[in-house]
Image (cartoon, helix red, strand yellow):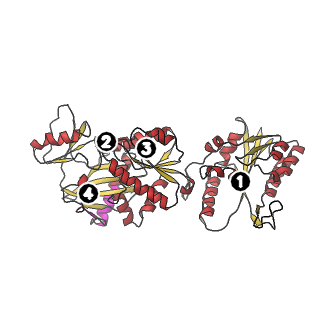
Amino acid sequence: MRYCVYIDGFNLYNGIRQFGQEYKWLDVELLAQHLIENNATLVQVKLFTAKLNGNNEKIRHQGIYLKALAKHCKKTSIIFGYFSKARKCKHCDHKNFEEKQTDVNIACEMLKDAYLNNFDIAYLVSGDSDLLYPVNELKKLGKTIIVAMPPGRISQKLSKTATTSIRINETHLKNSQLPHRIQTARGFITQPLKWQKIVVLMGGNSAERVISLNSGEAVYNALKSQNIDCFKFDWQGDNLDQLWRQKFDTAFIVLHGRGGEDGYIQKQLENRGIRYTGSDSNASHNGMDKARTKMIWKQHNLTLAASIVASINQPIEPIDFPLPWVVKPTLEGSSIGISKVDNQTQLNDALTLAWQHNSHALVEQWIKGDEYTVAILGDKALPVVKIITEQGFYDYESKYHSNETQYLCPCGLSPSQEQALQAIALEAFFAINAKGWGRIDFIINHHNKPYLLEINTVPGMTSHSLVPMAAKAMGMNFNELVVAIINEI
């Protein structure tokens, strides 16, 4: 059996308005396929809508949607009608009544296809009684006509006139959404943020909880200031059931440290088919473990300081690289639990501190030099930031409390040196299979040789944070950065 589906776009979208913005990114071809029989042949979908002119946000979003539809739905034709002022509504005496003059287009297309025998069964997605005439005519021609009525747009007359009728429910809409991003020759078409509901995941139960709450508050305020539908959720390690009870399309993850940056929360979202910012669960897991990260980078022949892993209650292997050393937990961020060891007698205390946070510690050769960081957004490296601290290295105090820490951007490297560092950062980022956004930290020694330190797959977004600083240096403000991170999903 051959099916054609005719969709009154104005009727359909007014019918789903009750759900807010939730289902506006609708794949009408997939919806049509869900309505017809499983083994049926979908010949064509015809979507009838109004051509809106102007440059306001609503019209721009319609343009984005229709471009995505035209690119993604190969069996779909978009047929435009228009708006015109009616002289007066006969029923309600409303002087500003607006009527969309596309019903005649729907009638003509349905009847033309019937006369040309282009289908065996026609579906009409509408609840508009004005379409009784073409439905009647199709039945006179011996055609089967099924009316699929959108939520809240029910016409008893249309239902009785058609061969049969069904009602489109929320499950149909939920299972018929376009891909979030659609690739074209000129780049990606991305679902407008105003059509999404975003949760900002913040807090967590790691040692970086306070920083995460600050980052989350900043991101939430940036979204709110742009009138984007969002809410914040303080994940405390045992309350995810509360999150799943809420409706949202996208998660902006600003959970730092274990639980939020190690792939756990990413895996939970993946299991539910929910989009989220940043790297996937595997890349997050690899990036959070400093020892695993170094192993992957070593396989890519990237320059690293010599190191060993020391595990609690296990013999420590001989350290064959010279003092000083730096000792840090393998699964902690924000330089928590980190110590510099200048002589052998300090090693036990340094390991004890690191083991308070994790059962494995990285003992690494201290590289004397200057600290730099490279933020990544999508497939581009942002301007390099140089970090100068009073502590001798960029520890937790230097990052979040000290007013003496200096950040230089421009960083003082020559253009060729900066480009080389950015290239290494991108190679290191993609070696982990990271994506979306992140940050790569370096030490450049006094012979101008760069050593990779670590990757941050969920960097900070506070007033002291380095990714916003780098973005600002290239002319991108905080609000724009937040939107750009979401658009990299």
The amino acid on which the numbered mark 4 sits, given as a three-letter code, is: His
Write the residue at 14% across / 48% down: 324
Which label sits in the foreground, 1 or 3?
Answer: 1
Residue 239 rendering spot, x and y as whole percentages: 43, 39
Where in the figure is residue 34, as x and y percent of width and height? 68, 40
Q: Amino acid at mark 1?
A: Gly
Residue 63 sits in quarter: bottom right
Of pointers 3 and 2, the one earlier in the residue sequence = 3
Cα gap from disc 3 to disc 2, whole angstroms: 15 Å
- Spatial CA span between label 1 and label 3: 36 Å
Residues under labels 3 and 4: Cα distance? 31 Å
**Magenta residue span:** 402-423
Above or below 133: residue 308: above
Q: Which of the 4 quarters of the picture holds residue 345?
A: top left
In 3D space, how far apart are the residues under numbered discs 2 and 1 (Cα atoms)? 50 Å
Q: Which residue is mark 4?
A: 401
Q: Residue furthest right?
A: 140
Location of mark 2 (residue): 289
Mark before the other along the chain sequence, 2 or 4: 2
Q: Which mark is residue 9?
A: 1
